[in-house]
Image (spheres, rainbow, N blue to C red):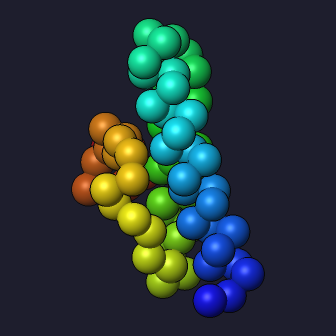
Amino acid sequence: MSAFAEAMRERVRTARAALAEARAAGDVYAAAVAEEELEDALWLARAHGVTTDPDSAPEPDAGDDGRGGS
């Protein structure tokens, strides 16, 4: 496994944990920031063919492309 792939997986794990923590705390702003980070991390991982564990934590509420745009 490449260092890049492992770094991307760690970024996704960290973002998922931050999102779960913010949601649990009811912090809407922190949840929005964490969701954006997770969306960016997932998009970048997918763009580079890095697989991530989809069952490790919550996914963002995003559009079809995972970027949340309309």
- The answer to whether residue 69 of the structure is visible from this angle is no
Residue 8: percent from left, percent from top: 62, 67
The residue lying furthest to the front in this view is 56
- The answer to whether residue 24 of the structure is visible from this angle is yes
The residue lying furthest to the right in this view is 3
Which corner quadrant holds the N terminus? Answer: bottom right
Residue 24 vertical placement versus 68 (above, below): above
Say left or right for 26 vs 58: right
Say left or right for 64 vs 3: left
**Which quarter of the figure has residue 3?**
bottom right
Residue 7 vertical placement versus 40 (above, below): below
The residue lying furthest to the bottom in this view is 1
Say left or right for 1 vs 39: right
**Residue at point 51% right, 22% down?**
22
**Residue at point 53% right, 70% down?**
45
**Which quarter of the figure has residue 52?**
bottom left
Q: Nearer the viewer, residue 14 or 64?
A: 14
The residue lying furthest to the top in this view is 26
Which corner quadrant holds the C terminus? Answer: top left
Residue 18 vertical placement versus 49 (above, below): above
Q: Nearer the viewer, residue 3 or 63?
A: 3
Residue 3 vertical placement versus 28 (above, below): below
**Residue at point 31% right, 38% down?**
61
Say left or right for 29 vs 55: right
**Residue at point 64% right, 74% down?**
6
> How many numbered marks does the figure carry?
0
Residue 47: percent from left, percent from top: 50, 76
